[in-house]
Image (tube, helix red, strand yellow):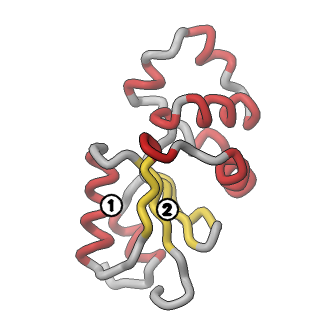
Amino acid sequence: MKGTCKNKLYGIPNCSTVKKARDWLAQHDIAVEFHDFKKLGLDIAIAQNWLQQTDWTRLINRSGLTWRGLPEQRKQSIQDANAVLALMLEKTSAIKRPVLEQNGKLLHVGFDEAAYSKIFKLES
């Protein structure tokens, strides 16, 4: 997956799952550009692109502190891609991390060694 493929990993540097993904990618010598949500935010076009490629429920971390800290009324209002888009742009820490994409194609949300091995065609 080297050469013309551009791998990009979105997340927060101190997130343990993001750390695991970054470590795994480094151990397998897979070049990846890291996009720090805290420093760089999230562009609306990128978020819309993800929502076109996967079900919106996969992109929200409902077990995280950010989700749990939302008022109950706000949680109940998250019923479709438009509501999720607004939440993702307002609170990037509500996004399930990390998000892995390649050349704009969403490859995986979260981290799973077996899934990453399959994505990058490595033996597990």
Residue at 27% x, 44% y: name it: 14
Residue at 44% x, 76% y: name it: 118
Give the left or right position of residue 87, taking residue 100 as reference: right
Residue type pointed to by label 2: Leu
- The first of marks 2 and 1 along the sequence is 1
Residue type pointed to by label 1: Ala
Residue 69 locus on image (x, y percent): 44, 16
Q: Quadrant of the C terminus?
A: bottom left
Q: Is residue 30 above or below residue 99?
A: below
Q: Is residue 86 above or below residue 47?
A: above
Q: Dot 1, crowdedness within 10 Å: few (<14), some or many (≥20)?
A: many
Residue 40 locus on image (x, y percent): 49, 47
The secondary structure type at the circle numbered 2 is strand
The secondary structure type at the circle numbered 1 is helix
Label annotation for residue 21: 1
Q: What is the CA distance from the residue labelled 2 to the residue labelled 1?
A: 9 Å
Q: Is residue 120 above or below residue 25?
A: below
Q: Dot 2, crowdedness within 10 Å: few (<14), some or many (≥20)?
A: many
Q: Are marks 2 and 1 in contact (CB under 8 Å)?
A: yes
Q: Quickly name the residue at label 2.
A: 100
Specify the quadrant of the image occupied by residue 88: top right
Give the left or right position of residue 82, taking residue 50 as reference: right
